[in-house]
Image (cartoon, coloured by chain):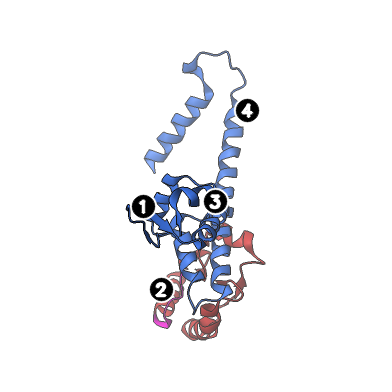
Amino acid sequence: MITIGKLAGLTSVSNDTLRYYEAEGLISPAGKSPAGYRLYDPDSARRIHFIKHAQQCGFTLAEIRDLLDVRSSDKACCGDVRTRAIEKKLQIESKIRAMKAMSKALDQLISECANEKRPVEECTIIAALERANGSKRVQ
Amino acid sequence: MFYSPGCAACEDRQAELRSAAQEAVKDLEWLDVNVIDNMDTAVELGVITLPSIVIDGEVVFTSLPTRAQLCKALTVRSGARK
């Protein structure tokens, strides 16, 4: 059994983050020391590495909790995990598409504002944004 | 219907839902779309969960419907087009 500090050292995650993972139901201590400190079994480090890798792939903590449940389920198969990974990719691709559209809209605003020395009340970007708000209100 | 290969739930119900749909609407064109091979199309249509059923370009079901739910959705749209 290892203390929270030792687990933090092994996984390069802060004590606060470990407590947060615990509050979110991602990890739980195996017990407590006589002095009342949390004690974790060594497999917790593996679980935390799993959480970190999943976060790097864009999974939220709720989704990671679901993945961890699948990981420990006897009935689950690789296809269940694969479907979740594909769904995450769909979400990421959708966000990329939305962000590209935002970037394109900004490109247009930037190119329309050719004279940066004009006073701010004549700023074409601000005018365009105000027009955009106005048209949205009408809808 | 957008699905991922290896999705046991999709495979179990795909044929059943396809035949229900074809019975409900005459001349219906049903496509089973492997999302891995059609990622761009899926993203364009707004598919983010699997399996999803898209009817006339609109995501209508984000999980597998019952036969009755699917038939109702199809007949409502089919009726609206007439």
Q: Do the residues at discs 1 and 4 belong to one chain?
A: yes
Task: Tell me if label 2 and label 4 are in contact, CB under 8 Å.
Answer: no
Question: What residue is shown with label 4?
Answer: A111
- Alpha carbon distance from label 3 to label 4: 50 Å
Question: What residue is shown with label 1?
Answer: A37
Q: Do the residues at discs 2 and 4 belong to one chain?
A: no
Judging from the image, what secondary structure is the residue with disc 4 in?
A: helix
Judging from the image, what secondary structure is the residue with disc 1 in?
A: loop
Q: Which mark is residue A10?
A: 3
Stretch in magenta:
B63-68
Judging from the image, what secondary structure is the residue with disc 3 in?
A: helix
Q: Residue B70, position in %: x, y?
A: 44, 77
Question: What residue is shown with label 2?
Answer: B76
Q: Chain of mark 2?
A: B
Q: For chain A, what colour was chosen?
A: blue
* Dot in front, 2 or 1: 1
* Dot in front, 2 or 4: 4
Q: Do the residues at discs 3 and 1 belong to one chain?
A: yes
User: Which amino acid type is marked by label 4?
Assistant: Ser
